[in-house]
Image (cartoon, rainbow, N blue to C red):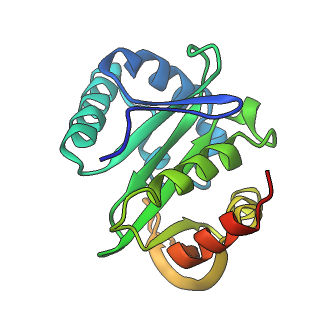
Amino acid sequence: MFPRLVRTERLILRAWEPADAQDLKSAIDANLAHLQPWVPWAKGEPSPLDAIVSRVEKFASDFESGAEWLYAIFGLDGRTLLGGTGLHPRIGPGGIEIGYWIGAPYTRLGYATEAAGALTRLAFTEPEVQRVEIRCDPLNEASARIPHHLGFRHVETLVGEFVMPAGAPRDTMVWRMTRAEHEKTLSTVRP
């Protein structure tokens, strides 16, 4: 459904491969303090390498089966792992959610915005996708700026919608762009 490789002006988004496991572990371990307040899956880290290998194998399997499409975010050298992003069909029929994370040394450089923008355009190449959402913690102002910058609308904040691994409830902002909004945005962009 979606390509394994997406190039942007400054990034290469590539489907995760088993050979990426050590780089992913290193990136997660180096960014625990940066990720754990915001990214629910990071609360269970660090994981041993064999668990990361299994995780990356599942990413690859899910990509091939169309369960979800997860990408490593690399610099243009194709070797520097900056973070991860993905398209998750977990918000119901006609919808797809974009998730992303960026390592601390690479924040505030526009990489997450560039990756999320590329995945937004990619998602709408599929006729069945009628809406794209980005969800984030309202306290994560940097993450919330990304959908706003891309033209998504904040449609609601789900109060206590998610329970963090420590048991505390977390609110979730829901940002949405419909196919019609995306097409309108494209028609107003001049070459």
Q: Residue 165's quadrant in the figure?
A: bottom left
Q: Nearer the viewer, residue 151 or 56?
A: 151
Residue toward you, 38 or 58: 58
**In the displayed structure, does residue 173 sit left or right of residue 111?**
left
Res 114 quadrant in image: top right
Residue 60 % position (x, y): 27, 32
Query: Which residue does the image show at 35% across and 14% down from the upper left?
Result: 19
184 vs 28: above or below: below
Residue 21: x, y in percent?
Answer: 38, 21
Is 22 located above or below residue 35 in the figure?
above
Residue 148 position, x and y percent, is: 73, 68
Q: Position of residue 139 (x, y in %)?
A: 71, 68
The answer to whether residue 170 of the structure is visible from this angle is no
Q: Nearer the viewer, residue 117 or 31?
A: 117
User: Residue at 34% across / 23% down in the picture?
Assistant: 17
Residue at horizontal 38%, vertical 32%?
4
Q: Is residue 58 visible?
A: yes
| 139 relative position to 60: left or right | right
Figure disc tally: 0
* Above or below: residue 88 compared with residue 130: above
Q: Residue at x 35, y 20 (%)?
A: 49
